[in-house]
Image (spheres, rainbow, N blue to C red):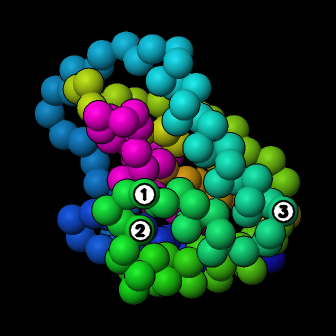
Amino acid sequence: MIAPALTAAVLLATSVSGQPAPAVTGDVVQIPMSASDAAETEAVADRFFRRLQTEGSSSGAIRELFEGTPLAGRTLELQQLTSSADLALSLIGPIRSWSLVRSENFGASIYRQTYVAEAAEAPLVVYFYFYRTDDGWASISIYLTTEPASLF
């Protein structure tokens, strides 16, 4: 049985939202991202999925994702995200694998990676948002959904 679509998001400006991932409208200037920058953000996503896979819960993965960022102190929003993500995981089953399906940068300082994680009953689509700080790339938002239509 395929679970109904579930969505969870933490956005720095809007807290938790059940709305679709914000679309980028207008002309977007694509600036090539360096291989080292791409590798840095991909490593963050890989750690996130490995924790989901090994722990079966999103709490540790979400906490690590936002560690050292302004979102780390937003306990209520992170608890809501964890609760929604854990509900999705309980409906779709354990994460078996994941793959990067799209990378987009918006200017030189915002980067979005889109992943599809395969689970027993349904896919999990995960959008990671990163911001270039003086110290490197920082996680600023994540959007998770069991609705693959968000990819198209």
Q: Is residue 137 visible?
A: yes
What amino acid is at disc 2? Answer: Ala
Between 151 and 86, which is closer to the camera in this rendering?
86
58 is within the stretch colored magenta: no
Question: Which mark is first along the chain, 3 or 2?
Answer: 3
The reply to whether discs 1 and 3 touch (Cβ–Cβ < 8 Å) is no
Q: CA distance from mark 2 to mark 1?
A: 6 Å
Dot 1, how many residues are within 10 Å of its Cα: few (below 14), some (14-19), or many (20+)?
few
Which residue carries the number 1 mark? 68
Residue drawn where x is 39% and y is 86% of the image? 76
**Element under disc 3:** helix
Residue drawn where x is 49% and y is 39% of the image? 113
Residue drawn where x is 65% and y is 54% of the image? 48
The reply to whether discs 2 and 1 touch (Cβ–Cβ < 8 Å) is yes
What amino acid is at disc 1? Answer: Gly
Q: CA distance from mark 2 to mark 3?
A: 22 Å
Question: Mark 2 or mark 3, which is nearer to you?
Answer: 2
Magenta residue span: 128-152
**Residue 64 image-quadrant placement:** bottom right
The reply to whether discs 2 and 3 touch (Cβ–Cβ < 8 Å) is no
x and y, in percent, of residue 71 in the image? 36, 66
Q: Which mark is residue 72?
A: 2
Which residue carries the number 3 mark? 54
**Element under disc 1:** loop
Residue drawn where x is 58% and y is 44% of the image? 44
Q: Is residue 2 visible?
A: no
Dot 2, how many residues are within 10 Å of its Cα: few (below 14), some (14-19), or many (20+)?
some
